[in-house]
Amino acid sequence: MNRNPTTPAALALALVAFAICAVPARAQTAAAPTSSVSPSPSPRPGSVHWTLDAHTTFVTQGTNGPGTRPPEAAGFANGDPLSPETPYDVFSSAPLVPGNASESAIIVQPAYSGKTFDAVLSLGAGYVRGSVTNAAYWGESLLPTMNPHLGATVLPYRITFPTHAGADDGTAFVASVLGGSIATKDGSAVLKGGWFDLTQTAPFVFVQPAITSAIPAIGMAPPETLGDGAPSLDLWQPSSPVYPLHGVDAVLRHGLATIELADASLPALPGTAARMRTASLVVDHGAGTRYTAQMLQVSTGGDLVSTTVLYGAGGHIENTPQGPLPVSTIGGQRQRIFGVAAAFHPIRTADAIVELGHSTYDADSVAEPGTGKAGNYYHAGISRTAGRATASLDLYRNEAYYANALLPYGAQENVWSVAWSWPGQWLKSNYQLINDFPVNIDRQGYRLRYGLKGPGSPLDVRVSFANFTQIQAITMSNALRTGFIDGFFLPQSDAYATLGRQHQYGLFVGYHRPFGDVTFDYAEDTMRRPAALSQPEDTVSYDNPEAVLTFSHRIGAATLVSAGLARYGMRGSFGQAYTNIDFAERIGFVGVEFAQSAHATALLSVRRTAFGGIPIQLAGPSPDFTGMLLLFEQRYHL
């Protein structure tokens, strides 16, 4: 490990030269920092073949305006729960700060093919120079061994609000063994170690942590899109949206059944530790019939962590312009989740799904020991296709005590966003163990979807509507009970408790013709919670519309261009009896992806951002700012 900018660059170049000159080249999709056995056609027993995946990314960004200097900046950088309104991209929660950053990574995988088994070793090297904030949040996710969001300290990252380029610059280099795997020739048994991705998991029991960086793309989509994501060439494989796990993993297959056992560490703050153990069984009959059972155990240790719940040690309420925010510290958490699921066909033209989850939770440092309860998760859905139309209905219940472990990671405030920002994970800087879309914790209700698309039709239409209500009000008494969480409403007095409601609306329209593809992607969330006249701080009433209009066109088989406009707005009240939320981010974007050869692809994206709104506190400074971001990335697969 070396931070000298000369030595790492020379070593990286030498590694590239060695890989290109000494190994046979072949095309391969972009590799994640995880090992998997992927043998060449009919490899000779006893032979070793090599693959190399590399990329280099350059990000330059400039911002201007009073919103680049939020009054909450100093407290936020030190872990204060009062989050700044700006400057960040509300589509991704990635910060918009001035600076230039270059980042490169190489993953080399020697693969041994034996008579009875195959083995792969994954070796990686990464180099960063320039703005560490831009390198950590824009472009590809950094190698795990240098990623500050996974707890690595080699990159000198810290939360800061620079107003000019060069204010947060740093340099780092790392080279390490990322992992390895060994498998039987028929793939019936695979053992992986180091950094890896799970082969299977039930998302209502466990999901890998979502990455915090904005994935490189030539387009945009709302976080709750009904579409297929940003336009992309087939050769440009999308980056993984999750971080890998670190530990050991075993997969055993027999007939229709697959068993997976894993023991791995989770992202955590420096001085803390979080570990997961899971066992899952999947019986897959094909054609959409699949049965799943999974168990998960998570534990934390080390230093106490500060979090925005009331039931931890030293819990208290801080009155802020963003509402009465609870704050406490917690540690020694223990979470267990068990889930079963079935996907099947009740009739020939219909698909059905049933998911049931049960969890228990406890912690050492809590305000009221012994007050925790078990929590449950229920989901039943059915969809039917008739001709070009598909319709579905899903019923959900996600209780306030289900999958509620508090797992802040990387930095104390890892995700940049205002307290009321939606959509997003609950409690913002915490990693949630399950997929909370479309239903969040302490919510129950239904979701309707309808789509119209068929072969030969240029028109693709998809719509959705969801209605979710609080299951239990988050009163002061409930909020003190171990494990009680409501992700987006703040505690109320017991005497004035009310139940909140959330609506979700979605629309996607695609028009595909030879001259190009035009898509309109729209999502809107509404949050409502009534309040007694004497309790104006309990008021929650706001709308959150998001829209993206995109045009894309292919130039031959090797080039795709895209341009569009995006808007993310929010208006209403949170924690006040008057309108204290009224802002919008408007983005114009253009981009191009092109295949330079069978082994190299590139992407260029440019965004212009204009953020405007009212101050979050009366007579406060303006949050307005503008920004320009350019990102260039080149990938190599050899």
Image: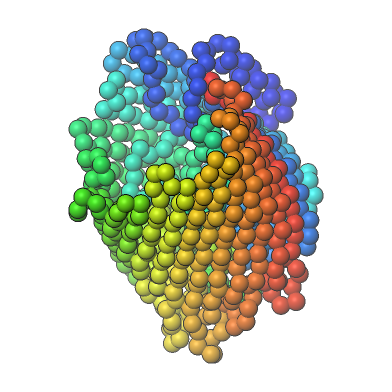
262 vs 241, nearest the viewer? 241
Going 28% across and 58% down the picture, which residue do you hit?
382
Q: Residue at x 64, y 54 (%)?
A: 565
255 left or right of 150? left
Q: From the top left corner, tell me how far across and down residue 239 is, in percent.
A: 52, 39
Quick check: 594 above or below 220? above
Q: Is residue 103 visible?
A: yes
Q: Position of residue 308 (x, y in %)?
A: 52, 65
Q: Is residue 551 left or right of residue 491?
A: right
Residue sitting at 55 percent across and 45 percent down? 517
Residue found at the very far bottom of the displayed protein: 533
Image side of residue 437 versus residue 127, left or right: left
* Residue at figure coordinates x 43%, y 35% from the top left: 196
Residue 559: x, y in percent? 60, 33
461 on left or right of 294: right
Q: Quadrant of the N terminus?
A: top right
Q: Position of residue 627 (x, y in %)?
A: 74, 53
Q: Nearer the viewer, residue 458 or 333?
A: 458
Its colouring scheme is rainbow
Instruction: Report which quarter residue 124 is drawn in.
Output: top right
Q: Is residue 410 visible?
A: no
